[in-house]
């Protein structure tokens, strides 16, 4: 069983819509959760981090964490073509290592 | 801003060669990591280091070794390159131990083994 699973893509949304990305993890002791954005041919770029249950908002991005259900999600509001990328969910289960999901590719249609 | 610099963006080597990938960070981070990224498989951890001269195996260490002689530099070594090591290699660094510190990535090295 994979440690971190993301909803399979690709996800295509019209410009201005909400893109919803989901991620589940297997280690109940996980403490820190991150969303990275990766443009094609580029390296991952941190866009959100969340550590406590509930919602965390940063501009058009909202991360949601539910530790009891072992899932974390990312909402992208008012999606723009520049949001077209692969989004990686990463979960930290100990002090050093991150476990990554395979990523969900988002395409925003103009 | 954190700056993680990988020595090469693209590299082509031949089967059996010894290959060195270099990574330098300028933020005095204790932790450094090497990943490879392959389509459909995501990022997989090869090795990490939490201090100078310290190293730990990740999930896929076979065929690789690492060196950390100075805090800012972490090298990945392919002892005898094989075609199945053709991949994107990503280096990352982070502050120590504190679980809410994110990892910051370099631009990656796309390595082709012919």
Image (cartoon, rainbow, N blue to C red):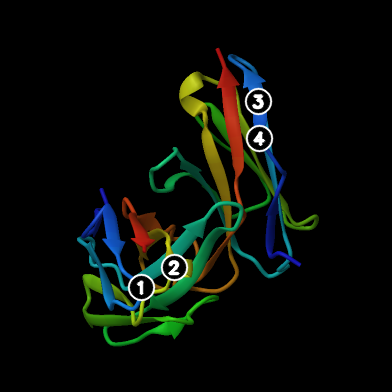
Q: Position of residue B87 (x, y in %)?
A: 43, 59
The disc, 1 or 2, on the residue closer to the chain's N-terminal end is: 1
Q: Which residue is mark 3?
A: A12
**Which residue is at the front of the view, B76 or A100?**
B76
Q: Is residue A55 visible?
A: no
Disc 4 element: loop
In the displayed structure, A3 sits above or below A94; it is above
Q: Quick check: marks 1 and 4 in contact, CB under 8 Å?
A: no
Please tell me which residue is depicted at 80% across the width and 55% down the height of the picture.
A69
Q: Distance between the Cα atoms at labels 1 and 4?
A: 35 Å
Q: Distance between the Cα atoms at labels 3 and 2?
A: 34 Å
Q: Which mark is residue B99?
A: none
Respond whether the residues carrying marks 3 and 1 are from the same subunit: no
Respond whether the residues carrying marks 3 and 2 are from the same subunit: no
Q: Distance between the Cα atoms at labels 3 and 4?
A: 6 Å
Q: Which residue is mark 4?
A: A10
Q: Which residue is mark 2?
A: B83
Quarter of the view holding residue A10:
top right
Respond whether the residues carrying marks 3 and 4 are from the same subunit: yes
Q: Which residue is mark 1?
A: B15
């Amino acid at each position: 069983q994979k440690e971190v699973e993301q909803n399979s893509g690709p996800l295509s949304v019209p410009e201005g819509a909400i893109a919803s990305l989901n991620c589940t993890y297997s280690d109940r002791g996980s403490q820190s959760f991150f969303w990275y954005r990766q443009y094609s041919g580029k390296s991952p770029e941190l866009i959100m981090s969340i550590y406590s249950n509930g919602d965390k908002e940063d501009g058009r991005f909202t991360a949601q964490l539910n530790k009891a259900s072992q899932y974390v999600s990312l909402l992208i509001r008012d999606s723009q073509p520049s949001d077209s990328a692969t989004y990686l969910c990463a979960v930290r289960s100990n002090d050093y290592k991150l476990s990554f999901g395979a990523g969900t590719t988002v395409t925003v249609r103009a | 801003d954190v700056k993680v610099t990988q020595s090469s963006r693209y590299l082509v080597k031949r089967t059996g060669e010894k290959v060195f990938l270099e990574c330098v960070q300028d933020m005095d981070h204790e932790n450094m990591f090497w990943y490879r990224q392959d389509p459909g498989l995501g990022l997989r951890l090869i090795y990490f280091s939490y201090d100078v001269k310290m190293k730990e195996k990740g999930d896929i260490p076979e065929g690789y070794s690492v060196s950390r002689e100075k805090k800012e530099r972490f090298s990945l070594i392919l002892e005898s390159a094989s075609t199945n090591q053709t991949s994107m290699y990503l280096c990352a660094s982070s502050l120590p131990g504190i679980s809410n510190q994110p990892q910051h990535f370099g631009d990656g090295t796309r390595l082709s083994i012919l």
